Amino acid sequence: MGQFGVMIGQLVGFFIMLLVGYGCVRLRFYGKVALDGMCSLLLNVLIPVLVFSNAVDGTDRSHLEANWGVMLLTAVMYGLLIVTFWAFAHLLRLKGSRSHVFQASLIFGNAGFIGIPLIMALFPKEGAIYVALMSIIDQALLWTYGVWLCEPVQSQGGSDSQAKTDGITGGLHALGVRVLNLLRRFVNPAFIGVMIALALILLGAKVPQMILKPLHTIGNMATPMSLIYLGGLFALTKWWNVLRRYELYVGLVAKMVVFPLALYALLTQVVSISPVPLPITHDMILVITVIAGLPTMTTIAMFTGRKDNMPEYAVGFVLVSTLFSLCSLALVSAIVF
């Protein structure tokens, strides 16, 4: 009941923030121009600062060495999520941007805005270290593979025809463009913040508290502003059309109930039968189980909205998954805790 109460309290708070954002737009306190500004502020300032300040606060090389199993589990979780929902997208015969946004919505859970306060509340002693180490893998994948999934899918017919026409030169040019586009995805504020934080931890450099304190204050604005932004987005987009999509129901049950329970059983079994000691504790497995069952990351809606790539579809996944998590997280926690 303790974990259930924590989850209900967090989700009720998030729901209130969504209502505030929805109400502000409906009452015409602000509109799309203001929401676009909030989106830019979140993506370029608040989220990167949140990630950086949480990663470097109280974390040093000894913590990294003692708890690097969390990073291993996070990488394993994302690897399984990517393979699982790539396969689901193909089995459900989803194509183009619909397939990619479907995958992004189910691979990336709301670790930043729901996961961090939830883990800190459930594991007050080691929660900060777990969050810092998980964020390195989480943000690196979100701002590279996640950004790519949220970009509009373009037809490859023209590129193939041009390559055939131009021969080797055209093929090399196309390869160069793809490599350059891939590298550009790494040049974003959040990923840079993660890399700077990791470098400071490895070098043993400490960020003074007089600097960390205002950074934490700024970063803590990310959660309420993101949910207020999302609430406003609900008021401006026809998100309810996603309720007609059959993949929504299959995907949410698979991602938020079946997958975390299967992952918990798999990891527990592997640790118990491993012939050599693994740097993985039971608390780490519980943490990654909760993270695996989180609702869709709000940043996915921001990414798709920025590119005008099925934003209603992504917003619908965020809203419905967040509401569904009230039941799914309670069910998962009742089984594993």
Image: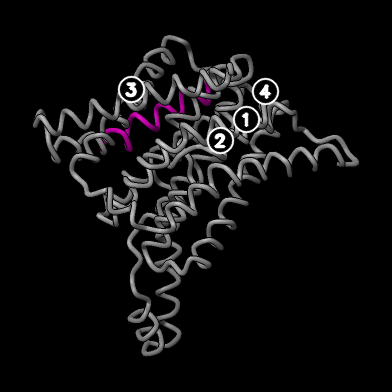
Q: Are marks 1 and 3 in contact (CB under 8 Å)?
A: no
Residue 248 lies left or right of residue 258; in this view the side is left
Nearest to N terminus: mark 3 or mark 4: 4
Quick one: SS at disc 2? Answer: helix
Kind of residue at badge 2:
Ile
Q: Which mark is residue 63?
A: 4
| Foreground label between 3 and 4 | 3
Bounds of the magenta segment? 40-56
Residue 195 shows up from this direction: no
Whether residue 46 is in magenta: the answer is yes
Kind of residue at badge 1:
Val
Task: For marks 4 and 1, give the CA distance.
Answer: 17 Å
For image coordinates 37% across by 14% down, the residue present is: 214
The residue labelled by disc 1 is 287
Could you say which is closer to the camera, residue 321 or residue 70?
A: 321
Nearest to N terminus: mark 1 or mark 3: 3
Task: For marks 1 and 3, give the CA distance.
Answer: 24 Å
Q: Are marks 2 and 4 in contact (CB under 8 Å)?
A: no
Task: For marks 3 and 4, give the CA distance.
Answer: 27 Å
The residue labelled by disc 2 is 291
Q: Residues within 10 Å of mark 2 (few under 14, many from 20)?
A: many
Whether residue 144 is in magenta: the answer is no
Q: Which mark is residue 221?
A: 3
Quick one: SS at disc 4? Answer: helix
For image coordinates 41% across by 14% down, the residue present is: 211
Q: Are marks 2 and 1 in contact (CB under 8 Å)?
A: yes
